[in-house]
Each structure stands twice: as C-alpha cells, then as structure tokens.
Image: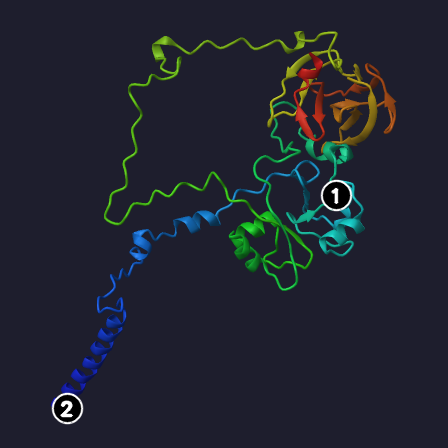
C-alpha cells in the first residue's frame, strides 16, 4: 500500500513538472531559443517599463478659485461654481443670466437643486459690468479691519492652458470620458463637482482637468542594478547674491522706512480721500482688501469719485456697507459707516457726503477700490 501511494505521488509530480516545462518551452522565439523572461516586468520594452508616466498623467492641477460671483473665466468660455444650498434660480440670479437659458444649455430642469461645487456652463459670456455688487459686498466685505483673512479670488481671466470641454452624449459615463482624455476619474469629479455616484447627464458640459506641469516631473528612473545619479552640489565658485552672505555681527540689511501714507495725497489724484483722517491700515493683497482711515465718529464720509450708488447692504455685524459704481468698471466700497444719506441708484458727485463715520471703540472708514470683483490698492487712485 505504501509503495502504491509513493508511486502515485511521483506520477502526479512528474505530470506537474512536465506541464511547467511545456509552458516554458512554449515561450520561445520560434527557433528553440527561450525568451529572456523577467517576471517583475522590468525587462519588457528594452528594460524601460515603468508605471511612473501613467501615475504622473493621472495627477491634475487643482481647479482655479472662482471669483466673488462663483465664475471661472477662460478666453473662450466661462463656468459658474454652485455654492452650498444653491438652486439653478439662485445661481442664475447671481451671474445675471436667465434661468431657462442656463437650464437648456446644461440639460437641467428649471429650479434644480445644485450640489456645492457643481459646475454650470454659461451659454454666453458674462462681463464684469454685470457683477452682483450686493453679493460682492455681502461676501467679500464682511472682513472689516486691517490684516483680516481674505477670500477674494480676484481673477477675471485664468492663467495657463484653457481646459478642454466635453459635452456628455447618451451612453457615456464619467469613467469612459476620463479614459477618453487620459485623466483620472477623481480629477474629473473634483473639477466638475460630480456627486458620489459619479453620474453625468446627457447634455452636461464637463471641464477636462489639464495635466499639472508642476507635478509632471521628468522621468529619472534608473535601470535595474544602476544607482540613481547623485545630484550636483551647489557650486562654491559662484558667489552668493550680494547681501545674502551677511553675518550676525554685520547686523540686518538696511530696511527702508515705512511710508507715511497719509502724507501721499495729491490734488491731481483720480480719487479724493473719502474721509478726513489718518490712514491706520494699509492695503495688503490677500490680507486686507482696502485701507482704514481713522476719523472721529460722526465725521462725513464722501464719495471718492462721481458715480452711481450700486448697493447698500450690511456686513455680518449688521454695519452698513455702501458700494458706488464708477466709469471704467470701478467700484468703491465704504464700510464702518452709519447714517447713509443717499439711496440705491442715486447719482453722486466726487466729494459729495454719502454717510458718516460710525461710532465705535476705534471709529474708522474701511475703504476699498475694486476693478470688477478684484480688489486693488486704493492708494494708486488716491495719490
């Protein structure tokens, strides 16, 4: 019995080994010479096989930040990004286009509820002159005071390559579209605000994420068994830039004195000072979108330039904010005020009193100048 079992075991082993040898023999070049198999795949294609390129192509740049209306602008098209709780009607009102037109263009139903971050294509260009100044005032100006964090997007035209657009046809999915353009489904979903089920609808416009130039590093993979090239160290023969090799004993480099902003006013400026006081807060892009002018409570606030009162609203603390529209797509914004003496739609002249400085612990006018929705330094207009 033991002999029979041993004989059977050897026979099974022989069959398995024979099958393996036949499989290996089949992998030949047709002349009896076996192929040079490389089971970790590095030998394929001249020993240059790598998944690094595919991984790099799967990464995409982040979607640009929209402006105060939620619009992302490119040279040939614009899209609007929905906010939390937005309906198509609310988005249409904010961008200044008819809801029915947006619905037809995007394959949506009128009154549709939108996801936060969902992208809606605009059927025609919306210029900066149609900006919802009430929305600008309510969202971008609730950070009154110097050195406050800013959510100002500012850009009216994005830099870099314009992303392709794809209109979904019947039968397509997010996966098939991503494969068509060689991008990851995740990037496609992030750029277009797709839902968790990644569903797309017929007629929907999708932006195709461009591949990020910043993350697409050159292929520096070495062949197996070859060490990675050592990067060159900094050259000791090239001197450092002048002033960069100061020692502690030499002290800090000379620092120019801070300018006296209040003394830089001239009579020939494009705008006049909106309040008579001392400038206590300077414009810093990304931190403070305007300047602060300390003045006595109750002192007059005047229009910096002639224009039309575009909006009167309030910040998060219910302090009034007034916006005046001027020629050249300029807006001036006045906050920290009270006792407004003009109405929305009224025409005002340069130097006309429009309000008073509001009483507070530190009474001051917060004054902004905006080119469209992008804040600019008021001093370039006041000097």
Above or below, comparing residue 61 to residue 143 in the picture:
below
Quadrant in the picture for residue 195:
bottom right
Above or below, comparing residue 12 to residue 249 in the picture:
below
Q: Residue at x 63, y 33 (%)?
A: 151
Quadrant in the picture for residue 336:
top right
Q: Position of residue 152 (x, y in %)?
A: 64, 32
28 displayed left or right of 152: left
Quarter of the rendering occupied by the N terminus: bottom left
Residue 7 has which mark?
A: none
User: Which residue, given by chain and number where applicable, does mark 2 sit on?
Assistant: 4
Quarter of the rendering occupied by the C terminus: top right
38 displayed left or right of 262: left
Which of the colour schemes (rainbow, by chain, secondary structure, one colour) is used?
rainbow
SS category of the residue bearing label 1? loop
Label 1 and label 2: CA atoms lie apart by 87 Å
Q: Residues within 10 Å of mark 2 (few under 14, many from 20)?
A: few
Q: Is residue 326 visible?
A: yes
SS category of the residue bearing label 2? helix
Mark 1 vs mark 2: in front: 1
Q: Is residue 134 visible?
A: no
Q: Position of residue 215 (x, y in %)?
A: 45, 41
Q: Residues within 10 Å of mark 1 (few under 14, many from 20)?
A: some
Q: Residue at x 24, y 75 (%)?
A: 22
Q: Residue at x 62, y 59 (%)?
A: 199
Q: Position of residue 269 (x, y in %)?
A: 73, 11
How many marks the image carries: the answer is 2
Q: Earlier in the sequence, mark 1 or mark 2?
A: 2
User: Which residue, given by chain and number where applicable, does mark 1 sit on?
Assistant: 124
Q: Residue at x 32, y 18 (%)?
A: 238
């Amino acid at each position: 019995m033991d002999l029979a079992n041993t004989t059977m075991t050897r026979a099974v082993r022989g069959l398995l080994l024979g099958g393996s040898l036949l499989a290996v023999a089949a992998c030949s070049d047709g002349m009896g010479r076996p192929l040079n198999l490389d089971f970790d795949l590095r030998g394929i294609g001249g020993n240059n096989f790598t998944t690094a390129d595919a991984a790099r192509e799967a990464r995409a740049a982040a979607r640009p930040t929209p402006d105060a209306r939620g619009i992302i602008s490119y040279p040939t098209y614009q899209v609007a990004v929905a906010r939390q709780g937005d309906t198509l009607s609310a988005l249409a009102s904010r961008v200044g286009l008819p809801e029915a037109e947006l619905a037809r263009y995007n394959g949506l139903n009128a009154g549709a509820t939108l996801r936060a971050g969902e992208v809606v294509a605009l059927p025609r260009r919306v210029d900066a002159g149609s900006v919802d100044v009430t929305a600008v005032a309510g969202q971008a100006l609730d950070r009154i005071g110097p050195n406050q964090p800013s959510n100002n997007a500012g850009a009216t035209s994005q830099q870099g390559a314009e992303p392709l657009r794809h209109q979904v046809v019947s039968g397509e999915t997010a996966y098939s579209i991503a494969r068509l353009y060689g991008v990851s489904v995740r990037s496609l979903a992030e750029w277009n605000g797709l839902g968790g089920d990644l569903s797309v609808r017929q007629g929907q416009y999708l932006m195709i994420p461009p591949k990020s130039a910043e993350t697409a590093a050159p292929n520096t993979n070495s062949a197996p068994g070859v060490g990675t090239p050592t990067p060159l160290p900094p050259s000791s023969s090239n001197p450092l830039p002048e002033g960069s090799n100061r020692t502690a004993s030499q002290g800090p480099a000379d620092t120019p004195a801070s300018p006296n902003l209040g003394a830089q006013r001239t009579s020939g400026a494009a705008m006049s000072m909106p309040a008579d006081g001392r400038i206590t807060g300077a414009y810093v892009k990304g931190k403070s979108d305007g300047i602060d002018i300390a003045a006595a409570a109750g002192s007059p606030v005047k229009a910096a330039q002639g224009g039309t009162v575009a909006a009167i609203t309030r910040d998060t603390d219910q302090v009034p904010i007034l916006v005046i529209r001027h020629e050249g797509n300029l807006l001036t914004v006045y906050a920290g005020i009270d006792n407004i003496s003009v109405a929305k739609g009224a025409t005002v002249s340069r130097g006309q009193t429009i309000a008073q400085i509001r009483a507070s612990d530190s009474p001051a006018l917060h004054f902004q100048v905006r080119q469209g929705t992008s804040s600019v330094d008021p001093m370039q207009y006041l000097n």
